[in-house]
Image (spheres, helix red, strand yellow):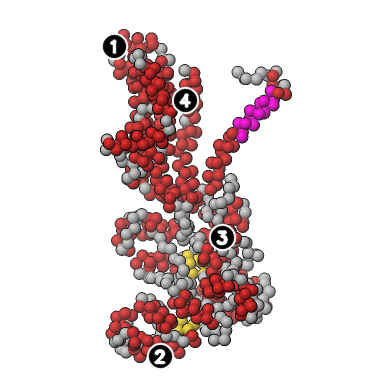
Amino acid sequence: MAIIGTVGRKRFKYRFLDFLIHFVLIVGSITMVYPFLLMLSSSVKSGVDSHKMDVIPAYIYNEKALYQKYIESRYNEESSRLMDNYPGSWISFREVELPDGHFPQIAEDFEEFLAESDEEYGVYHYYLAEHYGRGVYPLAQREYRKQIRRETGGDLLEFNRRYNTGARFWEEIMVEEKDVLRRNFASSDQGYLGRFRKFKEDSPLWMRYYINPEGAFVNTELIPVYSDKLQELNADWSTDYQAWDDIRLPRSYPGDDSPMAEYWLHYVRDVINIHHLKLESSSLTGFRTMLSEKYDTIRMLNQAWDSSFESFAEVELPAEFSGAIVEDIGLYLQAYARPDEIGITNIAEDFRDFLEGKYGEIAGLSASWGRDYGGFEEINYPTAELDYHYFKLRQKQIRGEFLKRNYLMALDQMLSDARSLRNTGIYIVLSILLAITINPLAAYALSRFKPKFSYQLIMLFMLTMAFPGMVMGIPNFLMLKKLNLLNTFWALVLPAAADGYFIFLLKGFFDSLPRELYESAKLDGASEFRLFWQFTLYLSKPILAVIALNAFNAAYRNFLFAFLVCQDQSMWTLMVHIYELMQRASSSVGYAALVIAAIPTLLVFIFFQNIIIKGIVIPMEK
């Protein structure tokens, strides 16, 4: 029956009341749904956009927002690498702007240049993009682990044996390559690092970003000195640079009279990686002299270098650096080499030489690239053009990657630790069994035998609801500790086995059952247990189902008490495991884990909503 009659609905005040009721209901539903939508949105974000409180992440429909996330992931969330390739431009990924346009020909020429000199620009000249980050599993990292698992048959012990490592979890299998251009970086073609090096060498070009040596030089040596004030550098050097990336890094010593000389020397002697340097042929005599001073005999040199020279006169300048050779080259560069004996492998200068050889005239290059250059020396290292080109080629896949990668990490963590899923399953089953056994027994006794103190008992049971669970946690913990039940399933289920509200609910339901049914069954010889099991419980299926659902919900979402009484990692439940994941993963991955964890509860609500509604209606009817 309607609250407002058909005739009454025609009156304005009733229409207004109806509108007001619906408006309040809609606002109330929004206040409930909006936080969940924010969590859903945050679960597909990263550091560059995590501060934005939007229901729909901007990168889904905005190219600039997507490009910022792409650059953040491409540079492995290392802003210092971004500053090396974009000197004087941005210090944060949130400042990244879209390039002026897309120039595929520039990327095509650069790829052609690399193809002709691939051996020269190896793993010391580029980073692997999307390989590591703060609390996420980027694309390249997942692909690398997938290959490792495939090779070892998913056996972590086999991986540890093969590469002589001690990884405890698959997530520990990763390599964070930082400061590839710096002196202290070293790669290897042996063991675990050798396996990663092969993965890096086999990676496609869109998964690499080559370091801008000129930008790294400017960012390391010049910007800190001049506090990012280019006009002060121009005043000191008597130059007219318009931007930091206009500054060139000479392949050889610029001369004592150059204002760049001291910075260039410091960079090559102390900063840049040995693999980016080369000794000129004029240094051979001095290098041999240093070796003879350091090593008393040629035998000692052969042992250190793993060589077979007959004398120091046979030593040549090494083409490849590894092991003790790197140390000796570094020592010579720092203490013995004259400035004119040192050269730099500068990929930016080499690329300009390649372009000049390919196009001949700058007019031809300008026409091909769609730009206007006055000379080949004006061409900057094409960092922005390469980044944007690979972004445009994979824009759809990039957006899909950001939508799924946090969930993939959360699922991997949940499924990799099957114990938490097993523990949660056992906990839920035991909680349901005890809830539909102990509570009905207590309620049946109070309803069937009606002791004199039944109302006092009910009041005592109801009083337990006056205390929050956190308050009861301390005495429960102390009790379980004295009983030596900590870190067991009994510690999880016993404190909540009997529930005052459930007993009150069941007693009211049992009281409503016809007494004649029990009297008839008693006359037919039915035992008390049969009356309880075959009659009472059979007629109480709806209310028992509601109690079972409530027990499931309480056990599944229980975190604080489960964490308190089961601190042993082998007894962690899913919620405790998610909490631990959130301590070391990014906040977005934590939100993704919570969204996944909410799915079982949502499914229970969808498929058992009729039972839930009965649980609301039946107590009100009684």
Q: Residues within 10 Å of mark 1 (few under 14, many from 20)?
A: few
Q: Nearer the viewer, mark 3 or mark 1?
A: 3
Q: Nearer the viewer, residue 131 or 568?
A: 568
Q: Which residue is mark 4?
A: 615
Mark 2 lies on a secondary structure that is helix
Residue 200 in picture, x, y percent from top left: 44, 66
Q: Residues within 10 Å of mark 2 (few under 14, many from 20)?
A: few
Residue drawn at x 57%, y 68% as measured from the top left: 86
Q: Is residue 594 toward the left or the right of residue 150 in the image? A: right
Which quadrant is the N terminus positioned in? top right
Does residue 461 lie above or below 83 as drawn?
above
Residue 470 in picture, x, y percent from top left: 41, 36
Residue drawn at x 36%, y 25% as measured from the top left: 439
Does residue 382 lie above or below 239 as drawn?
above
Residue drawn at x 47%, y 21% as measured from the top left: 619
Q: Which residue is mark 1?
A: 525
Q: Which mark is drawn over residue 285?
A: 2
Label 2 close to label 1 by CB (< 8 Å): no
Amino acid type, callout 1: Gly
Q: Quadrant of residue 7?
A: top right
Label 4 close to label 1 by CB (< 8 Å): no
What is the magenta range? 14-27
Q: Is residue 17 magenta?
A: yes
Q: Compute the Cα span from label 2 to label 3.
A: 48 Å
Dominant SS in magenta: helix
Amino acid type, callout 4: Gly
Residue 348 in picture, x, y percent from top left: 55, 75
Q: Which residue is mark 3?
A: 93
Q: Nearer the viewer, residue 476 or 151?
A: 476
**Sequence-earlier tag: 4 or 2:** 2
Q: Nearer the viewer, mark 3 or mark 4?
A: 3
